[in-house]
Image (cartoon, rainbow, N blue to C red):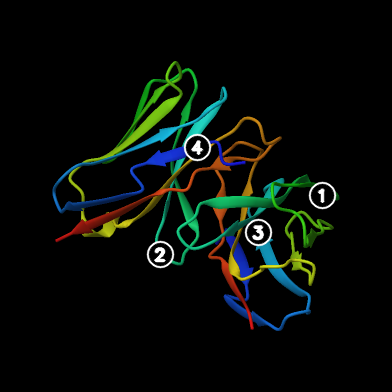
Protein backbone atom coordinates (compact mmCIF):
# COMPACT_ATOMS: atom_id res chain seq x y z
CA UNK A 1 0.00 0.00 0.00
CA UNK A 2 1.29 3.45 -0.87
CA UNK A 3 1.42 5.41 2.35
CA UNK A 4 3.39 8.40 1.11
CA UNK A 5 1.83 10.94 -1.24
CA UNK A 6 3.97 13.57 -2.92
CA UNK A 7 2.78 17.01 -3.87
CA UNK A 8 2.86 18.51 -6.42
CA UNK A 9 2.67 15.75 -9.03
CA UNK A 10 4.73 17.87 -11.40
CA UNK A 11 6.90 20.92 -10.99
CA UNK A 12 8.62 23.05 -13.61
CA UNK A 13 11.22 25.66 -12.67
CA UNK A 14 14.20 27.46 -14.17
CA UNK A 15 17.81 26.82 -13.34
CA UNK A 16 18.91 28.64 -10.23
CA UNK A 17 15.48 28.54 -8.60
CA UNK A 18 14.64 26.46 -5.57
CA UNK A 19 12.37 23.42 -5.84
CA UNK A 20 10.18 22.29 -2.98
CA UNK A 21 8.21 19.09 -2.93
CA UNK A 22 6.11 17.68 -0.15
CA UNK A 23 5.22 14.26 1.16
CA UNK A 24 2.33 13.33 3.42
CA UNK A 25 1.84 9.97 5.09
CA UNK A 26 -0.81 8.33 7.22
CA UNK A 27 0.64 6.19 10.00
CA UNK A 28 3.49 6.62 12.44
CA UNK A 29 6.98 6.01 11.09
CA UNK A 30 10.51 5.26 12.25
CA UNK A 31 12.12 7.05 9.34
CA UNK A 32 11.33 8.70 6.03
CA UNK A 33 13.53 8.54 2.96
CA UNK A 34 13.74 10.49 -0.28
CA UNK A 35 14.81 8.93 -3.58
CA UNK A 36 15.46 10.27 -7.05
CA UNK A 37 14.77 8.49 -10.35
CA UNK A 38 16.04 9.59 -13.71
CA UNK A 39 13.86 8.54 -16.62
CA UNK A 40 14.06 4.81 -17.29
CA UNK A 41 16.56 4.17 -14.50
CA UNK A 42 16.59 2.73 -11.01
CA UNK A 43 16.08 4.88 -7.93
CA UNK A 44 18.92 6.51 -6.06
CA UNK A 45 18.75 7.16 -2.34
CA UNK A 46 19.10 10.83 -1.42
CA UNK A 47 18.54 11.20 2.29
CA UNK A 48 17.02 9.48 5.32
CA UNK A 49 15.49 11.38 8.22
CA UNK A 50 14.54 9.67 11.46
CA UNK A 51 11.32 10.34 13.32
CA UNK A 52 13.20 12.15 16.11
CA UNK A 53 14.88 14.54 13.65
CA UNK A 54 13.27 17.72 12.36
CA UNK A 55 15.69 18.77 9.66
CA UNK A 56 18.56 17.30 7.71
CA UNK A 57 20.91 18.67 5.07
CA UNK A 58 22.96 17.04 2.35
CA UNK A 59 24.68 19.36 -0.09
CA UNK A 60 21.93 21.34 -1.87
CA UNK A 61 19.22 19.19 -0.31
CA UNK A 62 17.28 20.10 2.79
CA UNK A 63 14.67 17.77 4.24
CA UNK A 64 12.27 18.60 7.02
CA UNK A 65 9.99 16.28 8.93
CA UNK A 66 6.92 17.21 10.95
CA UNK A 67 5.61 14.08 12.64
CA UNK A 68 2.67 15.95 14.19
CA UNK A 69 1.43 16.79 10.69
CA UNK A 70 2.71 13.54 9.19
CA UNK A 71 4.50 15.43 6.47
CA UNK A 72 7.97 16.00 5.04
CA UNK A 73 9.41 18.38 2.51
CA UNK A 74 12.40 18.18 0.21
CA UNK A 75 14.03 21.43 -0.84
CA UNK A 76 16.56 21.51 -3.65
CA UNK A 77 18.37 24.83 -3.70
CA UNK A 78 19.88 26.47 -6.78
CA UNK A 79 18.43 23.84 -9.12
CA UNK A 80 20.33 22.66 -12.15
CA UNK A 81 19.11 21.05 -15.36
CA UNK A 82 20.71 17.82 -14.11
CA UNK A 83 18.23 17.79 -11.20
CA UNK A 84 15.46 16.96 -13.69
CA UNK A 85 14.06 13.68 -12.40
CA UNK A 86 11.23 12.18 -10.40
CA UNK A 87 11.48 12.35 -6.63
CA UNK A 88 9.86 9.84 -4.31
CA UNK A 89 9.37 9.72 -0.59
CA UNK A 90 9.32 6.36 1.17
CA UNK A 91 8.17 5.47 4.64
CA UNK A 92 8.44 2.41 6.81
CA UNK A 93 5.41 1.35 8.79
CA UNK A 94 2.51 -0.84 7.95
CA UNK A 95 3.97 -3.06 5.23
CA UNK A 96 5.93 -5.48 7.35
CA UNK A 97 9.58 -4.88 6.68
CA UNK A 98 9.42 -3.07 3.36
CA UNK A 99 9.18 0.62 2.48
CA UNK A 100 6.07 2.28 1.08
CA UNK A 101 6.74 4.58 -1.85
CA UNK A 102 4.58 7.45 -3.02
CA UNK A 103 3.77 8.20 -6.66
CA UNK A 104 6.47 10.84 -6.92
CA UNK A 105 6.95 14.43 -8.01
CA UNK A 106 8.22 14.96 -11.53
CA UNK A 107 10.66 17.88 -11.55
CA UNK A 108 11.68 19.65 -14.74
CA UNK A 109 14.48 22.20 -14.54
CA UNK A 110 14.91 24.26 -17.69
CA UNK A 111 18.07 26.18 -18.58
CA UNK B 1 32.90 -2.73 -7.50
CA UNK B 2 29.80 -3.38 -5.42
CA UNK B 3 26.31 -3.03 -6.72
CA UNK B 4 23.09 -4.59 -7.81
CA UNK B 5 22.49 -5.82 -11.33
CA UNK B 6 19.39 -6.81 -13.24
CA UNK B 7 19.12 -8.64 -16.50
CA UNK B 8 17.97 -8.43 -19.15
CA UNK B 9 17.38 -4.70 -19.61
CA UNK B 10 14.55 -5.31 -22.08
CA UNK B 11 12.44 -8.44 -22.27
CA UNK B 12 9.67 -9.37 -24.65
CA UNK B 13 7.27 -12.15 -23.90
CA UNK B 14 4.40 -13.76 -25.70
CA UNK B 15 1.14 -14.14 -23.87
CA UNK B 16 0.98 -17.38 -21.92
CA UNK B 17 4.73 -17.64 -21.34
CA UNK B 18 6.51 -17.51 -18.03
CA UNK B 19 9.63 -15.35 -17.85
CA UNK B 20 12.28 -14.97 -15.17
CA UNK B 21 13.96 -11.68 -14.33
CA UNK B 22 17.39 -11.84 -12.76
CA UNK B 23 18.58 -9.78 -9.80
CA UNK B 24 22.04 -10.15 -8.27
CA UNK B 25 23.80 -8.10 -5.59
CA UNK B 26 27.32 -8.25 -4.19
CA UNK B 27 26.69 -5.79 -1.37
CA UNK B 28 26.28 -8.55 1.22
CA UNK B 29 22.77 -7.27 1.95
CA UNK B 30 20.30 -9.45 3.79
CA UNK B 31 17.12 -7.86 2.44
CA UNK B 32 16.02 -7.83 -1.19
CA UNK B 33 12.89 -6.48 -2.89
CA UNK B 34 11.00 -6.55 -6.16
CA UNK B 35 8.88 -3.59 -7.29
CA UNK B 36 6.71 -2.93 -10.27
CA UNK B 37 6.42 0.54 -11.78
CA UNK B 38 3.80 1.53 -14.33
CA UNK B 39 4.06 4.75 -16.39
CA UNK B 40 3.66 7.84 -14.23
CA UNK B 41 3.16 5.74 -11.15
CA UNK B 42 5.06 5.01 -8.02
CA UNK B 43 6.57 1.71 -6.97
CA UNK B 44 4.39 -1.16 -5.89
CA UNK B 45 5.92 -3.96 -3.87
CA UNK B 46 5.67 -7.44 -5.37
CA UNK B 47 7.78 -9.57 -3.01
CA UNK B 48 10.50 -9.04 -0.45
CA UNK B 49 12.98 -11.23 1.35
CA UNK B 50 14.62 -10.45 4.67
CA UNK B 51 16.96 -13.41 4.62
CA UNK B 52 17.96 -16.44 2.57
CA UNK B 53 15.22 -19.05 2.13
CA UNK B 54 12.55 -16.66 3.32
CA UNK B 55 10.32 -14.28 1.38
CA UNK B 56 7.02 -12.47 1.88
CA UNK B 57 4.28 -11.32 -0.45
CA UNK B 58 3.94 -7.64 -1.08
CA UNK B 59 0.89 -5.71 -2.23
CA UNK B 60 0.66 -7.19 -5.74
CA UNK B 61 2.12 -10.71 -5.54
CA UNK B 62 -0.57 -12.45 -7.61
CA UNK B 63 0.86 -13.87 -10.83
CA UNK B 64 4.47 -13.62 -9.61
CA UNK B 65 6.82 -15.99 -7.82
CA UNK B 66 10.30 -15.65 -6.31
CA UNK B 67 13.04 -17.71 -4.73
CA UNK B 68 15.91 -16.82 -2.42
CA UNK B 69 18.28 -19.76 -2.41
CA UNK B 70 21.39 -17.59 -2.22
CA UNK B 71 22.01 -14.33 -0.41
CA UNK B 72 23.18 -12.68 -3.63
CA UNK B 73 20.27 -13.66 -5.85
CA UNK B 74 16.53 -12.96 -5.86
CA UNK B 75 15.00 -13.93 -9.22
CA UNK B 76 11.43 -12.99 -10.08
CA UNK B 77 9.24 -15.15 -12.32
CA UNK B 78 6.34 -13.50 -14.07
CA UNK B 79 3.84 -16.25 -14.72
CA UNK B 80 1.08 -16.51 -17.28
CA UNK B 81 -1.35 -15.89 -14.44
CA UNK B 82 -0.26 -12.24 -14.33
CA UNK B 83 -2.91 -10.57 -16.47
CA UNK B 84 -1.13 -7.32 -17.23
CA UNK B 85 2.62 -7.90 -16.90
CA UNK B 86 3.88 -5.12 -19.18
CA UNK B 87 5.76 -2.81 -16.80
CA UNK B 88 9.15 -1.69 -15.52
CA UNK B 89 10.50 -4.02 -12.84
CA UNK B 90 12.95 -2.84 -10.22
CA UNK B 91 14.98 -4.91 -7.82
CA UNK B 92 16.51 -3.44 -4.67
CA UNK B 93 18.49 -4.53 -1.66
CA UNK B 94 19.26 -3.14 1.77
CA UNK B 95 21.56 -4.19 4.57
CA UNK B 96 18.55 -4.48 6.84
CA UNK B 97 14.82 -3.79 6.44
CA UNK B 98 13.93 -0.08 6.52
CA UNK B 99 17.48 0.97 5.73
CA UNK B 100 18.57 2.77 2.58
CA UNK B 101 17.70 0.69 -0.47
CA UNK B 102 20.03 0.26 -3.42
CA UNK B 103 18.30 -0.23 -6.75
CA UNK B 104 19.24 -2.05 -9.89
CA UNK B 105 18.83 -0.43 -13.32
CA UNK B 106 15.51 -2.18 -13.97
CA UNK B 107 14.05 -4.55 -16.54
CA UNK B 108 11.38 -3.37 -18.95
CA UNK B 109 9.03 -6.24 -19.76
CA UNK B 110 6.71 -6.05 -22.73
CA UNK B 111 4.10 -8.66 -23.50
CA UNK B 112 3.43 -9.03 -27.21
Which x, y percent locates residue B84? 66, 68
Residue B97 in view here: yes
Q: Nearer the viewer, mark 4 or mark 2?
A: 4
Whether labels 1 and 2 share one chain: no
In this view, the residue in front, B59 or A19, is B59
Task: Indicate the chain on which mark 3 is placed.
Answer: B
Residues at discs 4 and 3 in contact (Cβ within 8 Å): no
Crowd band around label 1 with a 10 angstrom C-alpha radius: few (<14), some (14–19), many (20+): some
Circle 1 sits on which residue? B52
Q: Nearer the viewer, mark 1 or mark 2?
A: 2
**Of circles 4 and 3, which is in front?**
4
Secondary element type, mark 3: strand
Q: Which residue is mark 4?
A: A4
Which of disc 2 and disc 4 is earlier in sequence? 4
Q: Residues within 10 Å of mark 2 (few under 14, many from 20)?
A: few
Measured from the top left, where is residue A104 in percent x and y?
43, 48
Which residue does the image show at 46% across and 39% down from the upper left? A5
The residue that appears at 72% across and 67% down in the rendered structure is B83
Q: Is residue B46 left or right of residue B104?
A: right
A52 or B28: which is nearer to us? A52
Q: CA distance from mark 4 to mark 2?
A: 21 Å
Q: Secondary structure at mark 1?
A: loop
Residue position for label 2? A39
Amino acid sequence: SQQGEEDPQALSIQEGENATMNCSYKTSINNLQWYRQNSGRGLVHLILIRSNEREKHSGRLRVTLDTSKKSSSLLITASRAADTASYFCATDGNSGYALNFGKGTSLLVTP
Amino acid sequence: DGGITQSPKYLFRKEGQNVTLSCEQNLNHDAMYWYRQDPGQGLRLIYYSQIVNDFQKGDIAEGYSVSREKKESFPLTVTSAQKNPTAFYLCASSIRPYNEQFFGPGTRLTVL
